[in-house]
């Protein structure tokens, strides 16, 4: 048991938040969760591919148990940030023992290429939110053409390919990477799902083309040919005639857009592989000053996410897409990253504020990794609450008073907040609707609709 029980502000309700809530509530603290979306789950609900029903149901059931605890208080439809419903500063004034930021990586990373603002150029996350029915993305149109290029070669790219193949049924979808086949980042499991769509001839031709560049730095092209074509004869599903291709050693530099604003192609600079900087590291690339245009009418960037600076925490000087955390190691676990937020200008820790999951490190792995990060982060949070750092929780109020403050703040700043009982009502209505329509799953398309169903639309 912790030395003293505090009321804690948990911002966000994705996997990192909920696994941390499990630990902190388990230590007897009261956890108040403030979540932007009406429903909890974050990317476990609105990111993981819709057909992975078993996994999603398992996570939902697990999270439901955490959210149903007496000392866990959920408020959805509440955005925290500088220009949002509630600021971090307002949360401090309520009298929380600590503020835990588990908002994921809500910013989008772009390459800043000419043509990126054309109509059929998208960030993968927007499409992912759209097909996972997250309002307001679920309400918008994302016009996709016949020939799609996806920039990036990780698991999110594979999800987008899967959607293009099975849902959009486009003619071609081409994944483009600056590096070679050996540097691909997707896992076998994700690749197997889309392998049925692989254009075998095109993959052979591409591997023939990049083979000598790979050999030049000691890589074995045949090993990667075998890995890339391993599943073509035993695909998990073959849902359309879409051809899935890959282009390696291509660095996107410009999107060709015609006078009518239509995307015509992705211009790439050819690259070659160079030895990694460190042993076992990833190969580097060197641009060659020669260009090639990949014809397409749609471009999707699947190059990872960044944090959203509007949250109001200082950014790291090391990388603009991360919030700053204390740079010094923690004596108790010097091998671990730090979780406590930091003000690089003042060179001071922000003692009562912690970052966990993708909010600490954007696009870092699967749910299991977010869980590990959250649980480790809790060690540092608990150490702070237990007075193990030079500054202890200041201004923390007893639970009843803190909760009074939260409720006053919500009724003033976020009057359409929903609690967990409301979420369960929405889920029940969606279940009934799915039954009525005889479909596996039904989700209301807009927040307005959910609020209307809860009689909260005034
Ligand atoms: C396309 C895609 C597919 C994936 N597929 C898989 C998979 O198949 N298997 C797997 O294990 N992992 C998968 N992952 C990874 C997994 O989703 C992440 O590891 C995990 O969700 C990260 O958890 P998180 O809690 O840090 O962030 P998130 O899941 O992003 O949660 C962030 C939470 O914060 C809330 N929030 C955001 N901003 C604010 C704010 N300003 N105020 C209040 N609340 C806010 C959001 O509403 C959300 O609830 C996938 C990820 C993506 C992007």
Image: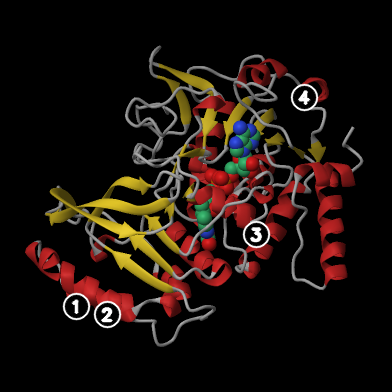
- Image height of 433 relative to 111, above or below: below
> Label 3 belongs to which residue?
59
User: Front-most of 270 and 145?
Assistant: 145
Q: Quadrant of residue 90?
A: top right
Q: Position of residue 414 (x, y in %)?
A: 77, 27
Residue at 25 percent across and 78 percent down: it is 204
> Label 4 belongs to which residue?
406
Q: Position of residue 67 (x, y in %)?
A: 74, 47
Q: Can residue 227 be seen in this snapshot?
A: no
Query: Which comes sooner in the sequence, label 1 or label 3?
Result: 3
Query: Which comes sooner in the sequence, label 3 or label 4?
Result: 3
Q: Is residue 25 left or right of residue 438?
A: left
Badge 4 crowding class, 10 Å Cα cut-off, few under 14, some 14 to 19, many 20 or more, is: many
> Label 1 belongs to which residue?
222
Q: Position of residue 436 (x, y in %)?
A: 88, 69
Which dot, 1 or 3, sits closer to the camera?
1
Mark 4: secondary structure: helix
> Label 2 belongs to which residue?
226
Q: Is residue 359 left or right of residue 110?
A: right
- Image height of 188 relative to 406, above or below: below
Query: Which comes sooner in the sequence, label 2 or label 3?
Result: 3
Q: Residue furthest left?
A: 216
Mark 2 and mark 1 residues within 8 Å of each other at the beta carbon: yes
Q: Residue furthest top?
A: 346
User: Front-most of 327 and 411?
Assistant: 411
User: Front-most of 416 and 395?
Assistant: 416
Q: Does the residue tagged 3 have its C-beta within 8 Å of any atom of ligand 1?
A: no
Badge 3 crowding class, 10 Å Cα cut-off, few under 14, some 14 to 19, many 20 or more, is: some
Figure quadrant of the C terminus:
top right
Q: Position of residue 79 (x, y in %)?
A: 67, 31
């Amino acid at each position: 048991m912790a030395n003293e029980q505090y009321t804690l502000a948990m911002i966000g309700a994705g996997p990192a938040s909920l696994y941390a809530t499990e630990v902190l509530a388990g230590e007897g603290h009261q956890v108040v969760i403030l979540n932007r979306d009406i429903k909890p789950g974050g990317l476990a609900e609105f990111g993981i591919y819709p057909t992975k029903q078993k996994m999603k149901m398992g996570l939902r059931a697990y999270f439901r148990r955490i959210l149903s605890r007496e000392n866990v208080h959920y408020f959805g439809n509440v955005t925290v940030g500088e220009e949002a419903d509630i600021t971090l500063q307002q949360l401090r004034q309520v009298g929380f023992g600590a503020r835990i930021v588990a908002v994921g990586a809500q910013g989008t990373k772009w390459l800043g290429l000419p043509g990126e603002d054309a109509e059929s150029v998208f960030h993968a996350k927007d499409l992912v939110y759209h097909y996972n029915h997250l309002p307001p993305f679920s309400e918008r149109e994302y016009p996709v053409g016949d020939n799609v290029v996806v920039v990036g070669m990780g698991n999110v790219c594979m999800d987008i390919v899967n959607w293009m193949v099975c849902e959009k049924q486009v003619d071609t979808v081409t994944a483009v990477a600056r590096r070679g086949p050996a540097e691909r980042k997707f896992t076998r499991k994700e690749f197997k799902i889309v392998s049925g769509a692989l254009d075998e001839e095109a993959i052979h031709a591409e591997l023939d083309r990049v083979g000598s560049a790979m050999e030049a730095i000691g890589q074995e092209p045949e090993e990667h040919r075998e890995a890339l074509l391993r599943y073509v004869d035993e695909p998990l599903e073959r849902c359309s005639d879409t051809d899935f291709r890959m282009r390696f050693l291509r660095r996107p530099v410009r999107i060709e857009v015609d006078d009518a604003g239509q995307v015509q192609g992705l211009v790439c600079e050819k690259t070659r592989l160079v030895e990694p900087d460190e042993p076992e590291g990833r190969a580097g690339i060197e641009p060659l000053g020669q260009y090639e245009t990949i014809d397409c009418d749609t471009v999707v960037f699947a190059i990872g996410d960044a944090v959203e600076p509007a949250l109001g925490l200082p950014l790291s000087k090391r990388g603009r897409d991360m919030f700053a955390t204390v740079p010094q190691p923690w004596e108790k676990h010097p091998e671990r990253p730090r979780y406590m937020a930091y003000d690089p200008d003042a060179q001071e820790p922000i003692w009562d504020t912690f970052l966990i999951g993708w909010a600490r490190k954007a696009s870092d792995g699967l749910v299991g990794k977010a869980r590990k990060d959250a649980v480790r982060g809790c060690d540092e949070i608990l150490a702070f609450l237990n007075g193990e750092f030079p500054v202890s929780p200041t201004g923390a109020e007893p639970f009843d008073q803190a909760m009074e403050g939260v409720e006053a703040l919500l009724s003033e700043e976020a009057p359409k907040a929903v609690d967990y009982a409301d979420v369960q009502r929405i889920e029940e209505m969606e279940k009934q609707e799915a039954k009525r329509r005889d479909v596996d799953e039904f989700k209301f398309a807009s927040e307005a609709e959910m609020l209307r169903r809860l009689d909260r639309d005034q």
